[in-house]
Amino acid sequence: MGPGMRFFFSRIFPLPFVIAGALTLYFGVHGIILANASAKWPTTQGKVLESKVEQHSDSDGTTYHAEILYEFSVEDVIFKGNRVSYGDYGSSSPSHANHVVNNYPKGKKVKIHYMPEKPEECLLEPGLKGQSFFMPLFGLIFFGVGCLMVVFLPRLMKKEEMATTARLERLNNDELSGYADPAAAAVDWSPLKSGGTNFRTHKLIKTGLDRMEFRAAMGAKIFYLIFFLIGLGLFAGFSIAEFQSEKFDLGMLLPIFVGLVFTLVGGGLFYHGTLPIVFDKKNGYFWKGRKSPDKVFSKSVIKHLAELDNIYALQLLSEHCSGNESSSSYYSYELNLVLKTGERINVVDHGNANKLREDATILADFLDKPVWDRT
């Protein structure tokens, strides 16, 4: 796939999902706000003028929708409306539409709820109902899928395990003979961490004379926060609406639960994605986490830990990843520590090779260790 097609599928193709999702989410949330407010709108007497089931057929089948037309007057001005409730929907089954039509037959006297400053905004059944959340939920899904595609589509590729293994097996001793140290040929050169990304997730920062850290890049933080803020907004908004509602609505639980899940996932991603990766000469350790080895009860609780004196070299290698149908591919690049025992520990893994090489060079100078680069 050429650069043009790759750009189209990774950047242009997700845009309709993002735009359609954002618009649907906006109008859906607007409808929820009106639905919640409608419970306190003034009322007046009205009359049903038409009541029938409309059906629309296309290649996907037939959809049935209740069409209720009514009129009412406010300060001697005649208004007409056709909304039964916020979140009205059509269905492939006529049962729901028939139920609505039976409830509001032609000629029936009905109570109309209307917005005081805009009486044409009116309905028969006020308040929040389960169907009020269909539109914003679909909008959130489309918007979320679009955002995920924007971020992940260039890199959400299935790992070509066999292809990568075959390529790495071709790295024989002759190819590695450029290194003066024979240990470079003996160490494992297969990817230590599966997958990876096609953008920079971490950057190296010098935080003191004897300390350097890899910290989360801004792009990664923004991605984590998208999940968190969407979830928090959804959870808080619907929870407040449920709290203010005069009666419990079971339909509220779904968006509240979805919002809670997004919030927890986003919070978890942000927490783990922003863990510092530390090289501290004063303590004499490398570790991943917010607590240094001298601040924990037992060093065994730190999953990624090594004494700086046990680091033998820094290893840079690449991993080729592609999609299910080879529609797109990318390389992810690993920076690993090679210990004197031959064991390897992954430091970072992302898609910006130039930045990773720069960081590896700076870190190697800081640690006074060689860099074995096979990228």
Image (cartoon, grey):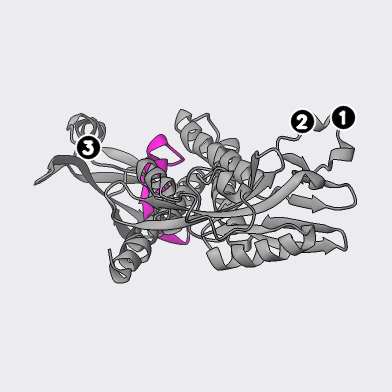
Horizontal arrangement in the rendering, residue 100 relative to residue 219 (left or right): left
Q: Is residue 134 magenta?
A: yes
Three-letter code, disc 3:
Ser
Label 2 belongs to which residue? Answer: 301
Q: Position of residue 228 (x, y in %)?
A: 59, 48
User: For the residues marked 1 and 3, what is the alpha-carbon distance in whole angstroms?
Assistant: 60 Å
Secondary structure category for the residue under label 3: loop
Label 1 belongs to which residue? Answer: 297
Q: Position of residue 110 (x, y in %)?
A: 32, 40
Horizontal arrangement in the rendering, residue 233 relative to residue 124 (left or right): right
User: Which residue is painted at 59% across and 58% down in the image?
Assistant: 179
Q: Is residue 236 magenta?
A: no
Q: Residues within 10 Å of mark 2 (few under 14, many from 20)?
A: few
Mark positioned earlier in the residue sequence (1 or 3): 3
User: Which residue is painted at 63% across and 62% down in the image?
Assistant: 218
Return the mark for residue 91. Answer: 3
Three-letter code, disc 1:
Phe
User: Which residue is painted at 46% across and 40% down in the image?
Assistant: 128
Q: Which is in the foreground here, disc 3 or disc 2? A: 2
Residues at discs 1 and 3 in contact (Cβ within 8 Å): no
Q: Position of residue 160 (x, y in %)?
A: 37, 45
The boundaries of the magenta stretch are 117-140
Residue 240 visible within the image: no
Residue 359 visible within the image: yes
Residues at discs 1 and 2 in contact (Cβ within 8 Å): yes
Judging depth in this view, the residue of 67 and 44 nearest the camera is 67
